[in-house]
Image: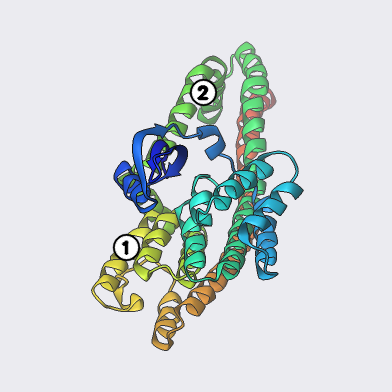
């Protein structure tokens, strides 16, 4: 929220200088009039961008939320709890952030407004949960739900990253081996074959041409790799290309089902968090679609949101050919019919995350032999291209 430096006159005629936050200058003037202040000068304050971009690691942020929750449950007021946490925090980003939030809360501002200053640490959906907790006088419960949500999201990310480590290591190793063979080993054999004036098989000729391309055309290959990387980044930022990419990935065996379950778990997690905090379902669905990070499923969820807006239940509003897992419809129907949508979303989140972990385990079990088979095939073809001319030479010697 923008901040303003204000010079104002109170009802006693005394000039006062203060700093106030408001969505715009009109709202600020209304706020000042409510305090019986007449502004003389209003000047926007440039945001402290470096400070606003502070962000804590999940391993630090989640325990911090739990500590704040425990102090609030013990009856400590929010400003005192924040002060204690700031004093106990180690020097660095955490202490700076807590001190800044405490300063604004001590001035009478709501906690969610003070938190929104740190845009990376408290994106809109997290700040909305804190705001709902303050409005309903259930801030400790909201903080607990928020900490649980962040811990679950971090667990899903950790599982996905761990699943990618082995394939990436193998791919890097295979790429390094191929470059070494093409750049260092194949040229030696090519010199030998050239000196023997042999008629080379097509496989050997293709391998030598590939070796020459690697040795002489590596700058072009580097540029091509960079262009492909930039193209992938551009595709991820272009809605239409991103939609086509996500739709194609959903059709890949095993991987598609894993992506589907991970995106569903993210949607259910964010939507449940906001719904339990008292945020309207339409807003929860819009935020869930935005944070799902999957263009196809997000489009289907937004289509369902349009149905909810005209009074239809969520389970009946999803498109008939939706890309969500099949179990989502019965779970949503049961939750909406019994008035326990939050419980249903939690069930979807838990079940989808478990299925994603199972699919990842299956994918890894299949990927290892596939990578080994691919590596064996590549090395085998290279070895065969070396030995075919030698077999031809030996056959000629035996004939003579």
Q: Quadrant of the N terminus?
A: top left
Q: Position of residue 371 (x, y in %)?
A: 62, 48
Characterize the local packing of mark 2: few (<14), some (14-19) or many (20 or more) Cα atoms within 10 angstroms. Answer: few
- Disc 2 is placed on an element classified as helix
Q: Is residue 205 above or below residue 43?
A: above
Give the total of numbered labels. 2
Q: In the figure, residue 187 lies in which quadrant?
A: top right
Q: Position of residue 10 (x, y in %)?
A: 40, 43
**Res 222 label:** 2
**Res 302 label:** 1
Could you tell me which residue is drawn at 43 percent across and 28 percent down? 227
The answer to whether residue 369 of the structure is visible from this angle is no
The answer to which of 53 and 25 lies nearer the viewer is: 25
Q: Is residue 137 above or below residue 55?
A: below
The answer to which of 310 and 32 lies nearer the viewer is: 32
Q: Position of residue 264 (x, y in %)?
A: 47, 65
Q: Position of residue 283 (x, y in %)?
A: 37, 64
């Amino acid at each position: 929220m923008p901040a303003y430096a204000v010079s104002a006159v109170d009802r006693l005629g005394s000039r006062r200088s203060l700093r106030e936050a408001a969505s715009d200058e009109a709202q600020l003037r209304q706020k000042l009039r409510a305090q019986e202040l007449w502004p003389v000068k209003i000047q926007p304050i440039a945001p402290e961008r470096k400070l606003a971009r502070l962000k804590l690691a999940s391993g630090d942020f989640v325990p911090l939320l739990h500590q704040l929750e425990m102090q609030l449950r013990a009856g400590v007021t929010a400003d005192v709890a924040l002060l204690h946490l700031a004093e106990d925090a180690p020097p660095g980003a955490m202490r700076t952030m807590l001190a800044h939030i405490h300063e604004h809360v001590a001035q009478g501002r709501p906690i969610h407004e003070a938190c929104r200053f740190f845009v990376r640490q408290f994106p809109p959906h997290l700040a909305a949960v804190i705001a709902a907790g303050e409005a309903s006088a259930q801030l400790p419960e909201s903080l607990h739900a928020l900490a649980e949500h962040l811990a679950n999201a971090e667990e899903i990310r950790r599982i996905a990253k761990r699943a990618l480590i082995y394939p990436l290591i193998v791919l890097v190793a295979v790429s390094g081996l191929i470059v070494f063979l093409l750049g260092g080993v194949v040229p030696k054999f090519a010199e030998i074959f050239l000196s023997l004036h042999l008629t080379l098989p097509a496989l050997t000729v293709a391998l030598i041409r590939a070796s020459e391309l690697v040795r002489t055309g590596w700058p072009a290959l580097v540029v091509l790799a960079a262009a492909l990387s930039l193209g992938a980044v551009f595709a991820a930022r272009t809605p239409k290309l991103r939609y086509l990419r996500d739709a194609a990935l959903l059709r890949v065996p095993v991987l598609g089902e894993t992506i589907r379950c991970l995106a569903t778990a993210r949607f259910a997690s964010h939507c449940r968090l906001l719904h339990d905090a008292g945020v309207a379902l339409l807003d929860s669905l819009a935020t869930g679609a935005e944070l799902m990070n999957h263009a196809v499923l997000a489009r289907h969820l937004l289509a369902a949101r349009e149905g909810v807006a005209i009074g239809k239940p969520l389970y009946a509003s999803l498109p008939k050919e939706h890309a969500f897992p099949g179990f989502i419809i019965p779970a949503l129907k049961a939750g909406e019919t019994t008035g326990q949508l939050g419980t249903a979303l939690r069930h979807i989140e838990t079940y989808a995350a478990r299925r994603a972990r199972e699919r990842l385990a299956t994918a890894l079990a299949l990927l290892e032999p596939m990578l080994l088979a691919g590596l064996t095939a590549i090395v085998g073809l290279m070895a065969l291209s070396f030995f075919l001319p030698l077999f031809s030479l030996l056959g000629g010697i035996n004939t003579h």
